[in-house]
Image: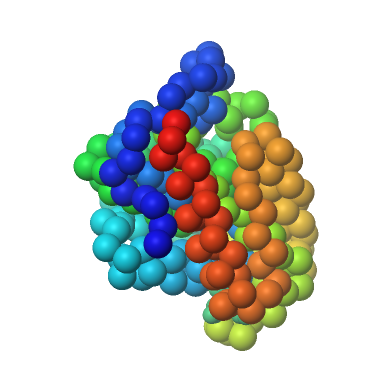
Amino acid sequence: MPAVGAVAVASSQESSVRGMLKTPHRYPGRLVVVEGIDGSGKSTQLDLLAKWLAAAGQRVFVTEWNSSMLVKAATKAGKKKNLLTPMTFSLLHATDFADRLTYKIVPPLKAGMTVLADRYAYTAFARDVARGVDRAWVRDLYEFAVRPDLVLYFRVPIEVSIERLMARRVKLKFYEAGMDMRWSADPVESFRLFQRRVLAEYETLVGEFGLHVVDAVGSISDQQRTVRALVSEQLEANRGE
Ligand code: ADP
């Protein structure tokens, strides 16, 4: 059984000058994040993990990227008219994230729950930088973010993710394919060009923020076995801190 939920308060050994995102949090709950390019299968894995933890008696809360009502209308309008520059897009996402963190992530963490986040600040670090936003600037923007207890990065080749996405729906979404960058008029080629840059950024994040890499090419069940083992192991290890 996974050892998550109301566990001991984590100790803070790292300097706060490096920001919250590099400093263990002090909430009784646990924060687990999944990251990866679109089509990596991370939502499928998170969903299975949530069900497994809930069946084991854990109090689980699931939260998604870009889900706050606060900036929904502005983002939608901007996207519709393709009015957003990469920096405006980045600021809107950071606002959305701040709202989600305050109202959806921190309260369950305070209540000792296990929060499962589908995408977190690392998505902004990968996507915004892929769109040309300054690396240091976007990291500073998210400095207030609570450090997760575990980040699982689902590493997958672009062709595999394209295959999965195309099997599911007729066409790739405009922003998912990075069409706003106008690198190619062909959605699949644009997806390749954009996601290649996103993948490269994720690789830099692995070392910088200690992301746990999951080979996302394998079957859903094999990956889920790895995910459960990592979650159990990691959260058990954090219990003693
Ligand atoms: P993401 O959240 O990373 O965009 P999803 O979990 O939504 O990815 O999965 C994208 C598509 O790929 C879905 O149709 C899903 O059923 C399928 N899928 C997920 N994992 C696998 C896998 N390991 N092998 C084959 N197809 C998968």
Res. 67 in view: no
- Residue at x 49% of width, y 26% of height: 23
Looking at the image, residue 99 lies above or below residue 165: above
Q: Quadrant of residue 99?
A: top left
Provide residue 128's location: percent of width, then percent of height.
61, 43
Of 64 and 211, nearer the camera is 211
Q: Quadrant of the C terminus?
A: top left
- Residue at x 68% of width, y 48% of height: 202
- Residue at x 45% of width, y 47% of height: 236
Q: Quadrant of residue 67?
A: bottom left
Provide residue 71's location: percent of width, then percent of height.
35, 46
Q: What colouring style does the render use?
A: rainbow
Q: Quadrant of the N terminus?
A: bottom left
In the picture provided, is 235 more to the left or to the right than 86? Answer: left
- Residue at x 68% of width, y 43% of height: 206
Of 177 and 15, nearer the camera is 15
Provide residue 173's location: percent of width, then percent of height.
56, 69
Q: Can you tell me which quadrant of the image ligand 1 is in?
A: bottom right
Res. 184 in view: yes
Of 178 and 201, nearer the camera is 201
Provide residue 16's location: percent of width, then percent of height.
49, 16
Q: Quadrant of residue 58?
A: bottom left
Of 58 and 98, nearer the camera is 58
